Image (tube, grey):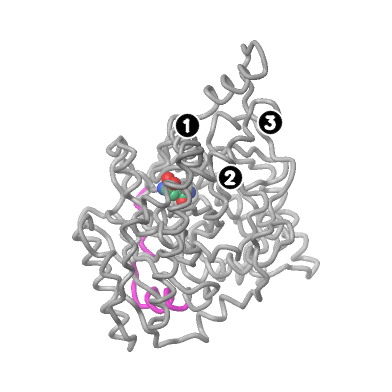
């Protein structure tokens, strides 16, 4: 049986489009129909605009007929996390604060995708303002994991992950501040890449913690992730932290970079709290790399244990500053019964933000306040440097590092009510953001009851081409990523 259109890879769709065996309108129709069929169970989308997507598809077909095709993503529908601006479309961050906001402009990544002919399709659910690990903190309700409907898809980019896993988009974009691409990718049997800080423009991304946030792709294969990355990467004068670097041909690198690689195993990532099925799956993946000639070495990242603490100081500090702009005056929710300006700020923010967002703003304001700044924020910045140095020291001996992506497979909705328990979902992903490194999650197995497991590969700054090649070397010898959920 041939694979349904909505589950096919970008290269196979591009070939069919190029050969005239398929039109983008047909492809987009198939994705729309699939979305309507499975959304009642999955709830990955905050909104979608069918007519707009079909109009974009018709333009792609017209371009193709005129011989003006723009490359592999021309005509391919990509889902977009609802924190990335698409001109004329809603942009909510899954918050009541922005429930009625329409973006007046395109994010740089959106502009680049449109420039490559991709069809921007739907706004995908998340934890409010990307704060969370389960997509349960959404003002629009939770998203389900396509592989286990009573479980979470991970977060915060849970909608972006669930949509691609369920065939509601071919690929998608998420954002990752402490694990929000990699952890949902692991929970939903996808490839999820958090690029090096500075590789992708953050212009038009709703800021959570600006020194940690990066946009990146979700895909059902390493190759699809590489193609998407190639479209969105590169310097942007509109983002002052964007880095001037060549964008290599990531897709070609999958073939040209063949290893063998030196891979580091940090013992700090295989200790207490790691689920035994996850641990075994990652051990097997490591053994596979050895079997193809890679050298596997123990490395130490001694400051790992401070990662979660440091992250929840720096990320909350930055979010308290970034979210100050939502004041009920310029945009977003405005309270109806305020008696003066100060009351308007208080009431609009009290009504507009959910509990987790408020918790973080309060914590972040506290760690930045006079008397506590030195004790918390400044010290956290110093430890952040130690964490980065741990990685850079390890990279004197190895090309990449392998860890589990998350300590457990997807958990059931409603089972992590304690914020600290939720924060611990990110113990293996947070260090990568603090150090500004690229990290990718790759499917590496399933629990006995059918929940996906992912491993994380962590690379050197701006070595995405190599990281993708290492991921591909594992993927091509395993069929995990080709399993689809029973929906
Ligand atoms: N789960 C982490 C948090 O709640 C990371 C979220 C993210 O990467 N956006 O902050």
Residue at coordinates 74% horizontally, 41% vertically from top-left? 104
Relative to 94, say whether 172 is above or below.
Answer: below
Q: Give left or right: position of 183 versus 56.
A: left
Nearest to the observer: residue 12 or residue 165:
165
- In the image, residue 457 lies in the stretch drawn in magenta: no
Q: Residues within 10 Å of mark 3 (few under 14, many from 20)?
A: few
Q: Secondary structure at mark 2?
A: loop
Q: Measure the alpha-carbon separation of dots 2 and 3.
A: 15 Å
Q: Give left or right: position of 158 versus 241.
A: left
- In the image, residue 484 lies in the stretch drawn in magenta: yes
What residue is disc 3 on? Answer: 331
Dot in front, 2 or 1: 1
Q: How many marks?
A: 3
Q: Which disc number belongs to residue 424?
A: none
Q: Which residue is most to the right?
A: 66
Q: Which disc number belongs to residue 358?
A: 1
Q: Give left or right: position of 277 versus 173.
A: left
Q: Residues within 10 Å of mark 1 (few under 14, many from 20)?
A: some
Residue 203: % across, % down = 67, 53
Dividing the image into 4 quarters, which one contains the N terminus? bottom left
- The stretch of residues the image draws in magenta is 469-487
Q: Secondary structure at mark 1?
A: helix
Quick check: marks 2 and 1 in contact, CB under 8 Å?
Answer: no
Quarter of the image for residue 12 reads bottom right
What residue is disc 2 on? Answer: 83
Q: Measure the alpha-carbon separation of dots 1 and 3.
A: 18 Å
Q: Give left or right: position of 271 versus 266.
A: left
């Amino acid at each position: 049986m041939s694979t349904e259109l909505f589950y096919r890879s970008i290269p196979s769709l591009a070939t069919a489009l190029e050969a005239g065996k398929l039109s983008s309108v047909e492809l987009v129709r198939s994705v729309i129909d699939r979305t309507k069929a499975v959304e009642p169970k999955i709830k990955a989308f905050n909104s979608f605009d069918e007519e707009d997507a079909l109009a974009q598809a018709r333009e792609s077909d017209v371009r193709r007929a005129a011989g003006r095709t723009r490359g592999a993503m021309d005509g391919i529908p990509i889902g977009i996390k609802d924190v990335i601006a698409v001109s004329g479309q809603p942009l909510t961050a899954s918050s009541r604060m922005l429930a009625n906001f329409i973006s007046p402009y395109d994010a740089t990544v959106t502009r680049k995708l449109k420039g490559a002919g991709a069809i921007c399709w739907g706004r995908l659910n998340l934890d409010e303002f990307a704060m969370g690990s389960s997509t349960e903190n959404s003002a629009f309700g939770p998203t389900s994991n396509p592989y286990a409907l009573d479980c979470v898809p991970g977060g915060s980019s849970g909608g972006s992950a669930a949509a691609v896993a369920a065939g509601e988009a071919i690929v998608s974009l998420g954002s990752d501040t402490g694990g929000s691409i990699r952890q949902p990718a692991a929970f939903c049997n996808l490839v999820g890449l958090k690029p090096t800080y500075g590789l992708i423009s953050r212009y038009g991304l709703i800021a959570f913690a600006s020194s940690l946030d990066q946009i990146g792709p979700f895909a059902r294969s390493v190759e699809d992730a590489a193609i998407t990355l190639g479209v969105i990467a590169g310097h942007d004068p509109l983002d002052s932290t964007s880095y001037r670097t060549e964008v290599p041909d990531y897709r070609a690198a999958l073939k040209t970079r063949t290893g063998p690689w030196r891979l580091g195993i940090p013992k700090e990532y295989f200790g207490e709290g790691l689920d035994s099925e996850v641990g075994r799956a990652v051990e097997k993946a490591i053994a596979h790399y050895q079997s193809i000639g890679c050298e596997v070495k123990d490395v130490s990242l001694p400051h790992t244990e401070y990662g979660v603490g440091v992250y929840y100081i720096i990320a909350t500090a930055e979010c308290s500053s970034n979210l100050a702009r939502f004041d009920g005056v310029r945009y977003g929710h405005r309270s109806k019964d305020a008696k003066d300006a100060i009351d308007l700020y208080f009431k609009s923010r009290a009504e507009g933000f959910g509990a987790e967002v408020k918790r973080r703003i309060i914590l972040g304001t506290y760690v930045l306040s006079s008397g506590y700044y030195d004790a918390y924020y400044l010290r956290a910045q110093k430890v952040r440097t130690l964490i980065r140095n741990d990685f850079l020291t390890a990279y004197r001996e190895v090309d990449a590092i392998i860890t589990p992506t998350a300590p457990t497979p997807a958990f059931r909705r409603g089972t992590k009510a304690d914020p600290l328990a939720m924060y611990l979902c990110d113990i293996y992903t947070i260090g990568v953001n603090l150090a500004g490194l690229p990290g990718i999650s790759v499917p590496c197995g399933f629990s006995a009851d059918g929940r996906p497991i992912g491993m994380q590969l962590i690379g050197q700054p701006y070595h995405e081409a190599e990281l993708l090649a290492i991921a591909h070397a594992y993927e091509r010898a395993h069929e995990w990523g080709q399993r689809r959920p029973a929906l």
